[in-house]
Amino acid sequence: MSNGTQSLSRKIDTAADLQSVVRTMKALAASNIGQYERSVKGLGDYYAAVQLGLGACFRENARMGVADAPQIGAKPPMIGAVVFGSDQGLVGQFDDVVADYAIKSLAALPAKALIWAVGERVRARLANGGLKLAGTFAVPNTVAAITHLVGQIQIESEAHRAQGEYAELWLFHNRPTSGSQYEPVGQRLLPLDAWWQAGIVKIGWPTSNLPEVIGDTLVTLRALVREYLFISLFRACAESLASENASRLAMMQRADKNITDLQEQLHARFHQMRQSGIDEELFDVVSGFEALGGSRQ
C-alpha cells in the first residue's frame, strides 16, 4: 500500500471514530430533549391548578390580594432579570439569540438592569453587551437538578429585592417551537401587582360550583404565590434546556451528514488511488513481460 492510500485509510478511520462520537452525542441530546419536554408537559396541569387557586383567593378577598402583592413605584431603581443560556458548546446561535433578545428587551424598559446569568457562555455574551451582572449560575444537566437551581435563584434574587435594588424581575429564555426550532421569550415575573391579579382573575373556574378558601385566605394566597414563582422559574429553565438540546441535536445531525459525505469522498478517492496503483502494477508486469520476451527474440 502506498503512502497516499495509507494516509487516506487513516483519514477514513478517523472519520469513522468521529462519526461514532457524533452519533452518541445525538442520542444523548435526543434523550435529554425527551425528559425536559416531559417535565414541561407535566407542569402544565399543576400550573393551571395554581392559577385557578390564585383566582379563587383574589375573588374571595380582592383587598387582601392587592395588599399582599409587591408594588412598583413610578421609577424603579433597577430591573432584575434572569437569562437562561448554556454552559457547553455545539449549540449554534443558542446563546446569541437569547442574549440579543434580552439586551433589546431590557433596553426598552425605563431602568437599568441587574442580570443573573444561567450559563457561562450566555454570561460572556451579556457582559459584552454592557449589562451589569449580579451573578452566574451553573446550568443543570438533569431535571432533578433544576429544583436546586430554582432555589438558588429565588434566594439570591430575593436578597437583592429585599434591599430595594430592583422592583421588577424578568425571565428570558429560549422556548421550543417545532422540531429543532426555538424562539426567545420574556416574562415579567415580579411584581405581582393589580395588573397581574386582574389577568389571573379572568381565568374562569372550570365548573359552575365556585370554590371557597378554607382557613386563612392570606396564608393560602402566599403559599400559592410561592408555587407560582417556583413553577415559572422551573418551566423557564426546562424549556431552555429542551431548546439547548434541540439545537445541539440539529448541529449533530448536520455534522453526521457532513461526515457521511466526507467518508463517501474519501472512499471514492481511496478506491480510485487503489485502482490506479493496481493499474500501474499491471502495466509494470506487462512491460516487464514484453521486455523479457523482446530480449529472447
Image: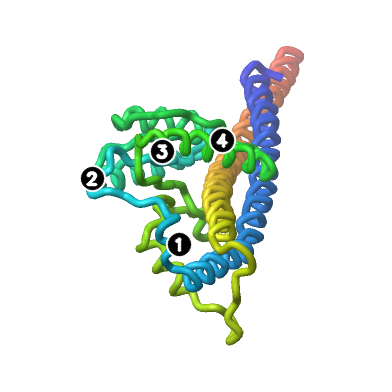
Say which of marks 1 and 3 sits in front.
Answer: 1
Q: Which mark is residue 161?
A: 3
- Lower position in the chain sequence, tag 3 or tag 4: 4
Q: Which mark is residue 228?
A: none
- Lower position in the chain sequence, tag 4 or tag 1: 1
- Residue 200 horizontal side relative to residue 52, left or right: left
- Lower position in the chain sequence, tag 1 or tag 2: 1
Which sits in the foreground, 258 or 139?
139
Q: How many residues crowd around disc 3 within 10 Å: few (fewer than 14), some, or many (20 or more)?
A: some
- Residue 250 visible to an observer of this rendering: no
Task: Give the structural element (helix, strand or loop) at label 4.
Answer: helix
Q: Identify the residue position indicated by label 2 in the image.
A: 75
Which amino acid, mark 4? Gln
Q: Identify the residue position indicated by label 1 in the image.
A: 65
Which sits in the foreground, 115 or 2?
115
**Contact? badges 1 and 3 (CB < 8 Å):** no
- Lower position in the chain sequence, tag 1 or tag 3: 1
C-alpha distance separating marks 1 and 2? 23 Å
- Residue 132 horizontal side relative to residue 231, left or right: left
- Lower position in the chain sequence, tag 4 or tag 2: 2
**Residue drawn at (26%, 47%) of the image:** 109
Q: How many residues crowd around disc 4 within 10 Å: few (fewer than 14), some, or many (20 or more)?
A: few
Q: Identify the residue position indicated by label 4 in the image.
A: 152
Instruction: Specify the quadrant that holds the N terminus.
Output: top right
Task: Give the structural element (helix, strand or loop) at label 1.
Answer: helix
**Residue drawn at (30%, 44%) of the image:** 106
Which amino acid, mark 3? Arg
Measuring from the top left, give residue 214's x and y in whole percent.
64, 68
Say which of marks 3 and 4 sits in front.
Answer: 3
Which sits in the foreground, 277 or 12?
12
Task: Give the structural element (helix, strand or loop) at label 3.
Answer: helix
Measuring from the top left, give residue 99's x and y in whole percent.
38, 40
